[in-house]
């Protein structure tokens, strides 16, 4: 079943509860929108498992149809909020890559604390769920202030090191939001960190 419903929302999941073969790399996309990114990744990398998180019901339903239509066995979606899922629900030391692409920038200064990259719950959870030594956090955003906040937040965390991310370094499809912003002439900022 491509819709993943946690057996219990108030305890940490076990890796095999999401996908049964816990030896396969697990990648997470937060706020997966229409699912275009993580479904392209799942198609391109059948040897990896992909879980998309999205809280909007309409987007979840559309993504479920796309997963079924593509016949993907390595893709699931969970309808839940990102900070809580990262901070408390996802399994410790289980995620090989976590993708955050064009998140809500909360552009007003008074809303800066709502930015995911400024939330301690998210940052602590990110350090907890990424595989030590190899797990990566990949961020893309069109919002320069959000990007500055992310760089500052991650630089203050000794558990992470910044990695280079050259253009076309590896397969990385464009999301619906990213395509929209690029069509409007906006720049996309990107950064990549590894869990030490």
Image (cartoon, grey):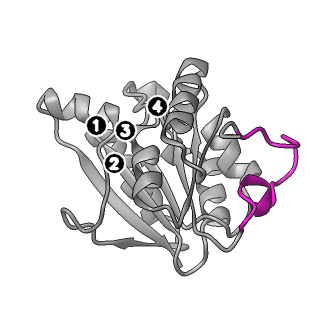
Binning the other alpha carbons within 10 Å of mark 4 as few (below 14), some (14 to 19) or many (20 upward) gives many
Which of the two discs, 3 and 4, labels the residue nearer the N terminus? 4
Point out the stretch of residues depicted in magenta: 4-21
Q: Which mark is residue 47?
A: none
Q: Secondary structure at mark 2?
A: strand
Q: Position of residue 187 (x, y in %)?
A: 17, 41
Q: Which mark is residue 140?
A: 2
**C-alpha gap between disc 4 and disc 1:** 11 Å
Which of the two discs, 4 and 1, labels the residue nearer the N terminus? 4
**C-alpha gap between disc 3 and disc 4:** 10 Å
**C-alpha gap between disc 3 and disc 1:** 6 Å
Which of the two discs, 3 and 2, labels the residue nearer the N terminus? 3
Are discs 2 and 1 less than 8 Å apart at CB? yes
Are discs 3 and 1 less than 8 Å apart at CB? yes
Binning the other alpha carbons within 10 Å of mark 2 as few (below 14), some (14 to 19) or many (20 upward) gives some
Q: Position of residue 47 (x, y in %)?
A: 52, 67
- What's the residue at 42%, 37% (across, down)? 103
Residue 24 magenta:
no
Are discs 4 and 1 less than 8 Å apart at CB? no
Q: Is residue 129 above or below residue 117?
A: below
- Residue named by callout 1: 178
Towards the viewer: 129 or 149: 129
Tell me where residue 81 sits by quadrant: top right
Are discs 3 and 2 less than 8 Å apart at CB? yes
- Residue named by callout 4: 33
Magenta region's main secondary structure? loop
């Amino acid at each position: 079943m491509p819709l993943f419903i946690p057996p219990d929302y108030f305890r940490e999941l076990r890796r095999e509860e999401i996908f049964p073969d816990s030896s396969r790399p697990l990648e997470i996309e937060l706020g997966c929108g229409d699912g275009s990114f993580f479904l392209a990744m799942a198609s391109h990398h059948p040897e990896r498992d992909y879980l998309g998180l999205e809280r909007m019901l309409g987007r979840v339903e559309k993504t479920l149809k796309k997963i079924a239509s593509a016949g993907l066995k390595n893709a699931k979606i969970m309808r839940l909020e990102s900070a809580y899922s990262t901070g408390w629900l996802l399994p410790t030391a289980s995620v090989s890559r976590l993708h955050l692409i064009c998140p809500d920038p909360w552009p007003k200064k008074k809303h800066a604390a709502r930015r995911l990259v400024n939330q301690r719950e998210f940052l602590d959870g990110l350090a907890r769920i990424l595989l030590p030594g190899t797990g990566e956090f990949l961020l893309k955003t069109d919002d320069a202030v959000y990007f500055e906040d992310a760089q500052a937040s991650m630089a203050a965390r000794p558990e992470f090191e910044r990695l280079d991310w050259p253009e076309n370094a590896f397969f990385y499809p464009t999301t619906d939001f990213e395509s929209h912003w690029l069509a409007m002439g906006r720049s996309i900022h990107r950064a990549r960190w590894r869990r030490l």
